[in-house]
């Protein structure tokens, strides 16, 4: 095993890049002892050279561009911490492979959209592409799946993979604030991505889920196959009503392979309040992995931020320094399968909130439609009301989304709905 330094070129000195430099500067000796060789930053690059980042960069060369750095012959690893999926990032990554560098990235969008091609490119060049920091920040879930659970048939991957959404949903509940009020708070705290729809629209979390499900099921990355629904339409009323019935609302990612095909969704779901996911507060992430031999593994931690995300980048750097080389998605890219997309999700119970006109027979018209759709009611509650409409909550037994959609469409014909009904899946965790 070599004892020569592992030489890094770091592209991007934002929160994550700065954090990586800080860890290497603070823990240089520790890292060298563990790896059996020094970790050395050779060059860095970012949009602005003069910005004060609170770190000393004087010992490193400044590269004119990410691509110029990727092509240098004095680096072994191109560490891509720029973000974004196209253009400059892709060409710099391509240049790194073409000139014999391994690549470490925190870039979920890049991998969710171009992961198959990049994995093939890396392998064709005999190089390695690693991405622990791209999924759930400081939680080592990529390694948990591809290494720790390598002996398992993974049956399901689920989790809360966007801290901003979890902050918004849990803060709405604890402070009794509306979505718009907490969205503004999250914005003031700097939690939101530059394009907030990446967070609240479920796209960022969907990218992460697509990467994990690829490792879990040996599938090609299929981000377009992830059914996405954001949290923008979740109301404080649903949060309170769901709590009354013993649930919490989460933006929940679920990936599962069954006879129906590969099911991938990132949508608001109800989870039992007493479950680990139900207890998850604030801007925290949780990844739950079900293996046939291991049983359920629950990983919880910070999904974003300087230290946690830099910690994940360091774990990949340390692998390379130690000579641990892994296929991008845990198996050779050519053996990843194009799995059929499940056209429907596994049956589940649903929570429904209805505002009914307060007149005789209204409720029976609704329950009749559920019966006609083959949907059985588990629990039902009608709340006291002073208005002309009656708030009704229904928790169904397991049913298919098709049957539910059928019933929802039929509700429209009853003439007793005061507002559009809300229906949210209850996930068995
Ligand atoms: N914006 C993300 C989150 C972190 O809130 O979890 C980066 O993926």
Image (cartoon, rainbow, N blue to C red):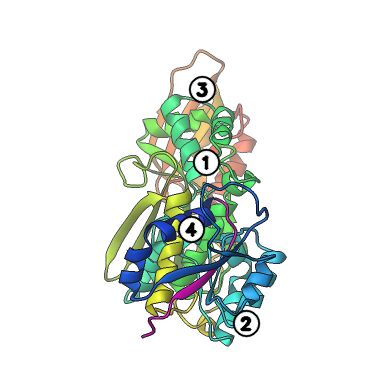
Q: Do the residues labelled 2 and 3 touch (CB within 8 Å)?
A: no
Q: Is residue 10 magenta?
A: yes
Name the residue furthest front: 58
Q: Nearer the viewer, mark 3 or mark 1?
A: 1
- With respect to residue 417, does 95 lie above or below? below
Query: Which is more toward the observer, 388 or 372?
Result: 388
Q: Give the range drawn in magenta.
A: 1-14
Whole-percent x and y of residue 219? 51, 74
State how far apart marks 2 and 4 are (Cα). Answer: 24 Å
Which residue is disc 1 drawn over? 423
Q: Mark 3 points at which residue?
A: 390
Find out whether the residues at labels 3 and 4 contact each other: C-beta distance under 8 Å.
no
Within 10 angstroms of label 2, few (less than 14), some, or many (20 or more) residues? some
| Disc 4 target residue | 21
Task: Give the number of the mark in front: 2 or 4.
Answer: 4
**Mark 2, residue position:** 99
Q: Sequence order check: which comes first, mark 2 or mark 4? A: 4
Which quarter of the rendering shows the N terminus? Answer: bottom left
The residue at 48%/54% (across/down) is 19
For residue 167: magenta? no
Mark found first going from the N terminus, 2 or 3: 2
Q: How far apart are marks 3 and 4 (CA)?
A: 59 Å
Q: In this rendering, which labeled residue sits more in front, label 1 or label 2?
A: 2
Gap in angstroms between the C-alphas marked 4 and 1: 47 Å
Residue 81 left/right relative to 293: right
The reply to whether dot 4 and dot 1 touch (C-beta < 8 Å) is no
Question: Camera-side residue: 8 or 322?
Answer: 8
């Amino acid at each position: 095993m070599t004892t020569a330094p592992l030489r890094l070129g770091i592209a991007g000195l934002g929160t994550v890049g700065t954090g990586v430099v800080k860890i290497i500067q603070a823990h240089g000796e520790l890292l060298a002892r563990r790896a059996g060789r020094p970790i050395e930053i050779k060059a860095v690059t970012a949009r602005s050279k003069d910005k004060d980042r609170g770190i000393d960069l004087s010992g490193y060369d400044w590269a004119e561009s990410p691509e110029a750095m990727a092509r240098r012959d004095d680096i072994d690893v191109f560490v891509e911490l720029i973000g974004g999926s196209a253009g400059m990032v892709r060409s710099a990554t391509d240049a790194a492979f073409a000139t014999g560098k391994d690549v470490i990235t925190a870039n979920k969008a890049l991998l969710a959209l171009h992961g198959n091609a990049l994995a093939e490119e890396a392998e064709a060049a005999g190089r390695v592409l690693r991405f622990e920091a791209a999924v759930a920040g400081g939680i080592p879930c990529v390694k948990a799946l591809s290494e720790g659970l390598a002996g398992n048939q993974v049956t399901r991957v689920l989790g809360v993979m966007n801290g901003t959404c979890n902050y918004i949903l849990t803060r709405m509940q604890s402070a009794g604030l509306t979505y718009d009020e907490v969205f503004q708070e999250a914005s003031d705290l700097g939690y939101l991505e530059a394009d907030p729809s990446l967070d609240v629209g479920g796209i960022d979390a969907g990218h992460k889920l697509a990467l994990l499900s690829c490792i879990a099921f040996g599938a090609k990355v299929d981000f377009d196959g992830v059914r996405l629904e954001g949290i923008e339409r979740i109301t404080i009323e649903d949060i309170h009503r769901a709590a009354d019935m013993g649930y919490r609302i989460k933006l929940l990612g679920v990936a599962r392979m069954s006879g129906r095909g590969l099911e991938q969704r990132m949508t608001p779901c109800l989870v039992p309040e007493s479950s680990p996911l139900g207890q998850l507060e604030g801007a925290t992430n949780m990844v739950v992995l079900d293996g046939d031999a291991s049983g359920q593994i629950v990983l919880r931690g910070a999904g974003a931020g300087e230290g946690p995300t830099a910690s994940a980048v360091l774990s990949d750097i340390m692998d390379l320094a130690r000579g641990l080389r892994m296929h991008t998605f845990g198996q050779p890219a050519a053996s990843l399968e194009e799995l059929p997309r499940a056209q429907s999700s596994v049956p589940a119970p649903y929570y429904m909130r209805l505002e009914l006109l307060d007149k005789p027979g209204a409720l029976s018209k609704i329950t009749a439609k559920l019966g006609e759709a083959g949907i059985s009611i588990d629990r039902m509650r009608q709340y006291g009301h002073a208005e002309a409409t009656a708030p009704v909550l229904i928790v169904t037994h397991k049913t298919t989304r098709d049957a539910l959609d059928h019933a929802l469409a039929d509700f429209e014909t009853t003439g007793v709905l005061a507002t559009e009904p809300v229906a949210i899946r209850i996930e068995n965790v």
